[in-house]
Amino acid sequence: MAIHAAKSGDPYLTVTEATRQINDTFEAQFPQLLFHGEISQLTVAASGHLYFSVKDQGAQLSCVMWAGMARTLAFKPAQGVAVRVHGRPNVYAQTGRFQIVVSRLLEDGEGELQRAFLELKDRLQREGFFSVERKRPLPFLPRAVGLVTSRTGAVLHDMMVKLRERFPSMVVYLSETRVQGDGAAQEIATAIRKLDESHLVDVIIVARGGGSLEDLWAFNEEAVVKAVFASSIPVVSGVGHETDTTLCDFAADVRAPTPTAAAEMVVPKVTDLLQRVGELERRLRDFDRWLQPMTQRIDELSLRLDTRATALLAEGRLRITAAEAKVSSIRPDKVLELLRGKIELFHGRLYRVGMSSTDRATIVVSQLRERLRRAIPIEKIDSYRDLVESLEGRLLVGMRRGVDDAKGHVLSLGLRLDSINPQKVLERGYSIVRVDGKPVRSIDDVCSGDGVEISVVDGFIKGTVTGRSKER
Amino acid sequence: MAKAGKETSVTLEALVNGEVSEEQVSSLSFEQALKLLEEVVTSVESGTLPLDRAIGSYEHGTSLIKHLRKLLSGAEEKLRVLNQG
C-alpha cells in the first residue's frame, strides 16, 4: 500500500488524512461492491436512515442506507431476510467505523420474482384471464382425465394412485412436459393445447410438486396462463404445496391445493356412485311402494263399486217385494167369483129383459168377456196352474217312490222269511226229529228205546232209538 | 367424443313414450343417465302414472341402471401417454 508522506517530511499522517486515504483507496478499488447475505441487527433511525448488518455464516458487514434511498424499497427489510446488496465500502470518519453505504437493496431472488409475479398478475387480471365469471364447473364424471406434468417424479405416481383408488377404470392421458427450467412454460402450454385438441378428455389437471418460487416459475408465465385460459376443457391447477400460489392457479377453472387434491376433485368415488345407483335400483324395485297409490285407488274404486252394487241390489229387492205384494193382492179366484156373480146377475137381467134383446145382450156379454179376459191375468193363472200341476206331479212321483220303496222292503223281508222257513230247510234234505212232539236238539233229549217221529219234506217216518254216541 | 355437441339430451317424456333407443341410452353420460333414473324413480313412486306407463318406466329404469353400472365397472386402466410431436 502506498504511503503518502506529508510535505513536511513527517511520515505520520493525521487521522483525518489516513481515513481520507483509506476511503479514496476503497473507492478506487470497489466502486461498487455486490454481495448477498441475511439482514441482522436492523435499526431504523428517527431520521429514517437504516442501520443494519448483512451476514453469512463466516462474516458480517455493517451497512447503512440513507433515508432517501430507504423510502424507495419495494419490500420491508426485516431481521433474517435474505438480501442482495449494492454498495460501497467506507470508513465513517467520525467514529472510524467500517461500513457499507448501500445504494440498492433487493430481497434475495424471490423479491425480484415476486415483483415480476405481482406485475404480471395485475396485468393479466386486467386483461380478464382470471375472471370468475369464466370459471366452468368440472364434469360430474369425466370419461377420461388429462394430466399435464412431468413423467418422472412422485407427482404423477401420487395422482395415479389417488385416481385409481377413487375410480379404478378411469382412463388417464398424460401429456408430458418439463415443469421447470428454460422453455418449460412453452412446453406446458403446448401440452395443454394437445390435450384440448385431442378431445380425448373431459378435464385437464396441470400439476407439479412443491418447490421454490423459481422452481414453480414456469407456471407463472404468460404462455401457461394463456393456454389454460384458452382450453375448451375445464382445467384444474394443482401446482406446488398448499401455500404456493401461481398464476396458473388463477387462470384455472379450479385451484387445487396439491396435485393429489386435484386428482381427488376430478373423479368421484366409484363406491359412492355404485351406492347411489343401488339405492335408486332398490327404490325402483320396491313395487309395493310405487304400486301403493295404485292399489289404494283400486281399493277405493272397489269400495265404491261395492256400495253401488249393494244399493242396486237393495233397490231390486224392494221392487221385487213390491211386485210380489201386488201380485199376491190379485186373487184370481176372488176376481173370478166376483165376475161370475156379476155375469149371473146379468143373466138374470137378460132373462127379465127378454129374448128380444138377445142380440144386444150377446154383444154385451162378449164385451164383458173381453173385459174379464183383460181383468184376469190369464198368464198368471196359467203359471199358478203350472205350479200346482208340477207340485201335483212331484207329489205323485214322491208317493210312487214311497210305495215302491215299501214294496221292495216287503219283498226283501219275504226273502229273509223264506230263508228261515223250516219247510225250505227240509227241501234241502235236512229232517227234524221229535220225541213226544218236541224237537230233539241233544243226545240227552232221548233214551234208548224212545219212539221218535222224523219229519221230512213230504211226510213222517216213525222209528225207535237204539243207541247214542257223542261221536259224530 | 367431444363433450360439446355430442351430448345427447334425452328427456323423461321421450323415454317413457318409448322414443329412446337402446343405443341412445347407452350413449348417455353417467350424469345424464343418473338424472333420468332419478326422475323415473320419482315418477313411478308418485303413483300418478297409468299402470302400463309405470311398467314401461320400470323397464327403462332397469336399462338405465344397467348402463350406469356398466359405466362404473371395468378393469383398472393403464396410463396412456399422448403422442409427442
Image (spheres, coloured by chain):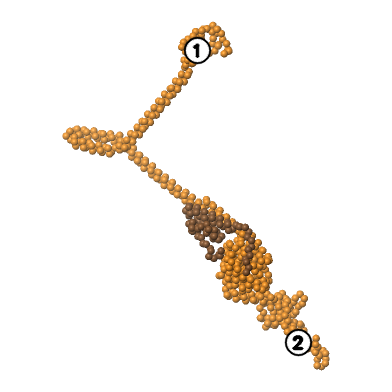
Chain colours: A orange, B brown
Q: What's the chain of the residue with tag 2?
A: A
Indicate which disc residue A233 carries.
none
Q: How far apart are marks 1 and 2 (CA)?
A: 189 Å
1 and 2 marks on the same chain = yes
Above or below: residue B11 compared with residue A215: above
The percent coordinates of residue A312 (x first, y second) are 40, 45
User: Amino acid type of disc 1?
Assistant: Ile
| Extreme residue in the right direction | A10
Q: Label 1's element?
A: strand
Above or below: residue A340 compared with residue B67: above
Q: How crowded is mark 1: few (under 14 residues within 10 Å), some or many (20 or more)?
A: some
Say left or right for A422 vs A137: left
The percent coordinates of residue A441 (x first, y second) are 53, 13
Instruction: Evaluate whether residue A167 shows in this view.
Output: no
Question: Mark 2 and mark 1 in contact (Cβ < 8 Å)?
Answer: no
| Extreme residue in the top direction | A449
Between A323 and A183, the one nearer to me in the picture: A183
Q: Which corner quadrant of the image does residue A169 belong to?
A: bottom right
| Extreme residue in the left direction | A356
Indicate which disc residue A432 carries.
1
Q: How crowded is mark 2: few (under 14 residues within 10 Å), some or many (20 or more)?
A: few
- The earlier-in-sequence mark between 1 and 2 is 2
Q: Residue at x 20, y 34 (%)?
A: A350
The percent coordinates of residue A146 (x first, y second) are 61, 65
Instruction: Evaluate whether residue A69 shows in this view.
Output: yes
